Amino acid sequence: MSAEAARAGQDSYEGGLRRVARVVLLDPDDRILLLHGHEPDDPADDWWFTPGGGVEGDETREEAARRELVEETGITDIELGPVLWRRRCSFPFAGRRWDQDEWYYLARTTQTAIEAVGLTELERRSVAGARWWTCRELTRAHETVYPTRLAELLRRLLDEGPPAGPVTLDTEIV
């Protein structure tokens, strides 16, 4: 799914699952930022996903969310909110299988210019860019987006606000 997996040797694992922090980043117009990724050796095998990546060493998931956002987008001016969703997933990427426990944090920013400042070599080969999406655009998209149902989840978030506690999403196995 996302190329930050290159740092897996430093990532924290719990119960065999890679601990991951992701960011549902919204701008003042309620657009969500998604990264455009693909298999390193097959750009036609592509998808969109939220910024984020593996927890490194003893950092907290919140720290990982902030660090990954800076590395992948250059965006530093955020208001990090609560954990919205949790998801377990398993997917092939760059020649191996990744089993992850992902936490999705809400964040808001007024900073919309994007500049990846800390991509690994693998990320440079597998992240093709980023784009701000409206909920309507996401609903009408024909591209693959992770997590699945993101358009529906975003619509509920915008209509109802953050849930009282993290919502557990369906496990996704690709």
Image: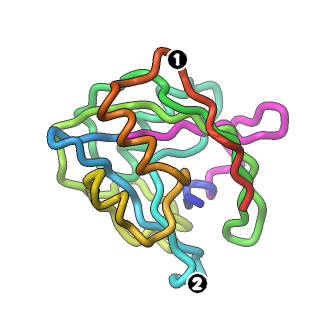
Determine whether, in the image, residue 134 is placed left or right of residue 117: left
Q: Nearer the viewer, residue 88 or 148?
A: 148
The residue labelled by disc 2 is 42
On screen, 84 above or below 48? above
**Count of labels in the image:** 2
x and y, in percent, of residue 151 in the image: 41, 51
Determine whether, in the image, residue 171 is placed left or right of residue 146: right
Determine whether, in the image, residue 10 is placed left or right of residue 136: right
Question: Can you tell which quarter of the image residue 25 is in?
Answer: top left
Q: In the image, which disc is placed on residue 165?
A: 1
What's under tag 2, amino acid-wise?
Asp
For the point 46% across and 49% down, the residue is 150
Which residues make up the magenta segment? 6-24
Q: Residue furthest right?
A: 15
Q: Residues within 10 Å of mark 2 (few under 14, many from 20)?
A: few
Quadrant showing the C terminus: bottom right
